Image (spheres, grey):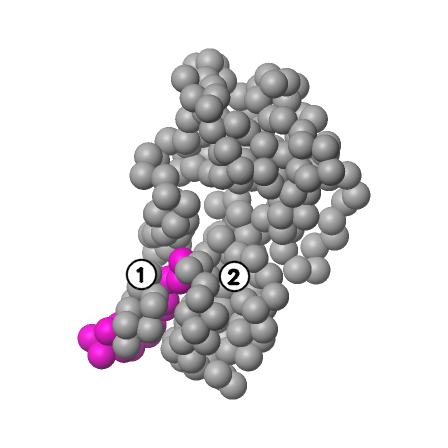
Amino acid sequence: MRVLVVEDDALLGDAIQAGLKQAGYAVDWMKDGVAADHALGTEAYAAVVLDLGLPRLSGLEVLQRLRSRNSSIPVLILTARDTVNDRIKGLDAGADDYLLKPFDMGELAARLRALIRRASGKVDLLLQVAGVKLDPAAHRVTCREQPVDLSPKEFAVLHALMLSAGKVLSRAQLEEQLYAWGEEVESNAVEVHIHHLRRKLFPELIETIRGVGYLIAAGKVD
Ligand code: CA
């Protein structure tokens, strides 16, 4: 899962980036509204953490521009100002949730998980396909009730495929979920992760759609 963090405070931005990376996200961090607006217009994110008080373009304007492009990407706004008015303006402009600074990193990660889950249309905390269960909160996977040890990137690939079960994801779409800006994408990385997942889970779970991408069939439900 790739998320965008927009925060001009260096210490706070750094802490959020570190916390979300630890929670398994690929994180892009923008420090002003114009850079954020540009990133949102060009990249695919699973969710956005957006500070309202930003240089160059306010968080509210970033949000309004995003929604005027008909993007439904989940947005969680951060505000230091504990005024009802700010929150109302943010929610009216299309924010999905908000947190008041200072906040707990664990709560931020949990709220992001909830937003991403809601946006994907999945209501269950636990994702389940063909005997494979994935718990995003605990970062745990079992196959036929046996725990399976996955690397963070393998987990991210499996999570993305299970969230869009029944839909083909291209290699590029999976890479976007795995790597943040500036991070070097190893060639064939996605193929290697898929290979490991098939070996650790079972080979038929993930189908290769030649020339298109990879798929976990939605019909493969227990
Ligand atoms: Ca700020």
For numbered disc 2, what is the local secondary structure?
strand
Q: Earlier in the sequence, mark 2 or mark 1?
A: 2
Across and down, in percent, residue 173 comes to 62, 48
Distance Cα–Cα, label 2 vs label 1? 15 Å
- Going by the numbered disc 2, the residue's amino acid type is Leu
At x 41%, y 17%, the residue is 222
**Residue 215 lies in the magenta-colored region:** no
Residue drawn at 50 percent across, 33 percent down: 166
Percent x, y of residue 28: 58, 61
Dot 1 lies on which element?
strand
Q: Please name the amino acid that badge 1 sits on.
A: Asp
The answer to which image quadrant residue 214 occupies is top right
Q: Residue at x 58, y 28 (%)?
A: 150
Horizontal side of residue 98 vs 130, given as left or right? left
Residue annotated with mark 1: 97
Question: Is 76 one of the magenta-colored residues?
Answer: yes
Q: Does residue 79 appear in this view? A: yes
Position of residue 117 in the picture relative to residue 7 (left or right): left
* Residue under label 2: 4
Q: Is residue 32 visible?
A: no
| Residue 217, percent from left and from top | 52, 27
| Mark 1 C-beta to ligand 1 under 8 Å | no
Is disc 2 surrounded by few (<14), some (14 to 19) or many (20+) residues within 10 Å?
A: many
- What's the magenta region? 74-88
Q: Quadrant of residue 206?
A: top right
Determine whether label 2 and label 1 are within 8 Å by CB: no
